Image (cartoon, rainbow, N blue to C red):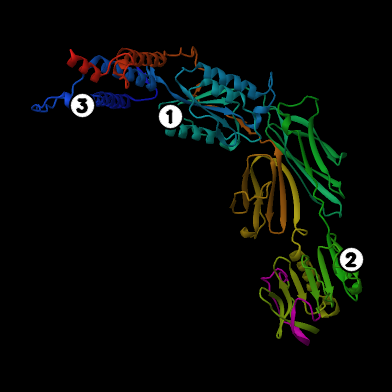
Amino acid sequence: MNFLNLSYGELLGLAGVISAGIVALYLLDRTKRRQVVATLRFWTAGKLPEELKHKRRIHQPWSLLLQVLSMLLLLLAIAGPRIGDLGAARDHVLLLDTSAWMGARARQGILLDQAKTAALVYVNSLPQLDRVMLVRADALATPVTQFESNKNAVADAIRRSRPSNSALNLEQALEFAQQAQKLQSQKSGEIVFVGAGRIAKQDAEIAVPANLRVISIPSNGENVGLRKLGVRRAATGADAWEAFVELRNDGLKPREVTLLLQYAGTAAGGKTLTLAAGSETQATFAFQAKTRGLLEARVTSTNGRGDAFPQDDAAVIEVPIDKPLHVAVYSPEPDLLKPLLAGTRQVEATFELPAKYDPQTPADIVVFDRFAPKDAPKKTPSVWIEPPAGSPFAIRANANRVKLDQWHQETALGAGLYTKDVELAATEVFTLAQGDRAVAETTQGPVVVERPGTVKMVALGFDPVRSAMKYDLATPLLMANILRWLTPEVFRRSDVQAGTVGTVNVALENGFNPAAIKVLGNDQRPLPFTIERNNLRFFSGAPGNVRVITGDRETVYSLTLPDVGDVAWTPPANAARGVRRGATAAATPPTPWPWLALAGGFGLLADWLLYGRRSIVRLTARADSPSLVERLRRRKAS
């Protein structure tokens, strides 16, 4: 006999404590009781007898024995005795393949339906005392139950399993199963993998444990699907775009497919491609897009028959039409600044005289040329050209015929500017406030200043189009730096790519700044990533959009395509396969604890009926019986 809830030592210890407590309470129960007697006139003086100390003894040994036996029976019921050998019970880990490929078509339903049936057969074949931990295996190993002896709970968890969007990482799942058996199991059983076992090609050679059992689910591996879909602006025109599509044939036979592209519901291109077995190919399309719209790529088989895994036959992304930058210019000579601002596709500029200034005019940037309004914008970035008194910038002096000596390359506005010895006919020299940074300087002081903060501002002590810099290359570069620094999100190059869930590799340009790299998820929270040489890598286990910002470039990864393994895993020859032949669930061993509890309860009831009621003392005399005083009086009278 074995015990489920207590060990032999714990049972003997509790039995000893309870028995000793019952005996101690039984001996202490013999206490003095108060009696009502006659007054002293009924007593004759005499010699007091000597007090004798009597040893405590058990007056009712059968009652004590019955109580001890009853409590021991109840304690045995709590211990949970089982008739049979519990040492043979083992703890198994069931790895159920819930990767994306398990959603492929089968003869009846999908592959995961067959895997569930096989897993249920295995669980039902185990002895009743064996415990099972269910782990759903895809890109991550997710435990669903602990080591559970209740087979119905494990079966319910198996039935609730659904295919994910990520590929199978079998090596990680096996390592997790071994750790679980090492840390949590009492006696390790089998590690059972149930699934198709489609993994990445580089993970084909993995070490397997000696107690591995594989229940393979056969699948039709003929599948051609999309792996990537991306768009970017073309250099041929303002509304020209390029789309690139990557396909892969996961099957063992060559396939001829038709690739169709649609933008905003209209056809944008189509190609017929032939893919060799296990190969990848790319296709490029050119189309026109003026407004935001959805770009859809779809692959179909030319023979009219679908493949085994239709989930990766279509991908949709949104074409990122950039929002134009609205610049409001207030200048007494607005025509002078038009060549600097009107020649850029991303900029929409309006030019007005200072008298028509309206602080409510919607704009992303406001340019004040020799003009300082009383109610300057407090929430809009601004550029001040030769600001007069009353502007946010303090003027130290006005200088004539000075040379521009230095550009500060470490600043955002001075990056890429090397022009020197340019003579300025007239310029204002500024006094730097706290937080200001000098961009360009003469011998008398700074003449171009940038002011960081919540609302950025730039001040130019001279007008670049009315000075000797009018025909210098530094003038348009300076204006481009100013606009990019004030509103970096408008000039950030944007790409959109649809890809597969899982690990994503991003190629970085040479000379990238690691501090400027950000990887943001759907909720704009940073995602962990690693950088190795010029390769950035991050992982996303669920569908969604991930933004990768690298300086002035932003790429949005729409991870909506399911990730499918490259090859089917071949188990080693020494691994057990299938459900054990002749294995049947053992009969449930008898559990006598209800009878023990019932016997213990009856024993306590019998003790109370036989011995307990005799100890009840009446505290009041019966009405029809004479008192002690009355009996003494009657005896004296007689």
Say above or below: 341 vs 309.
below
In magenta stretch: residue 393: yes
Residue identifier under label 2: 350
Residue located farthest toward the bottom when viewing the structure as drawn: 400
In three-dimensional space, the C-alpha distance between marks 3 and 1, rounded to whole angstroms, equals: 77 Å
Horizontal arrangement in the rendering, residue 87 relative to residue 534 (left or right): left
Asked which secondary structure carries label 1, the reply is: loop
Report helix, strand or loop for mark 2.
Answer: strand
Q: Residues within 10 Å of mark 3 (few under 14, many from 20)?
A: few
Q: Is residue 596 above or below residue 174?
A: above
The residue drawn where x is 72% and y is 48% is 556
* Labels 3, 1: front one: 3
Tag 1 or tag 3, which sits nearer the N-term? Answer: 3
Q: Quadrant of residue 167?
A: top right
The residue tagged 3 is: 39
Specify start and end residues of the magenta stretch as a single range.
Answer: 388-416
In this picture, residue 361 sits left or right of residue 89: right
Which residue, given by chain and number where applicable, does mark 1 sit on? 185
Q: What residue type is disc 3 on? A: Thr
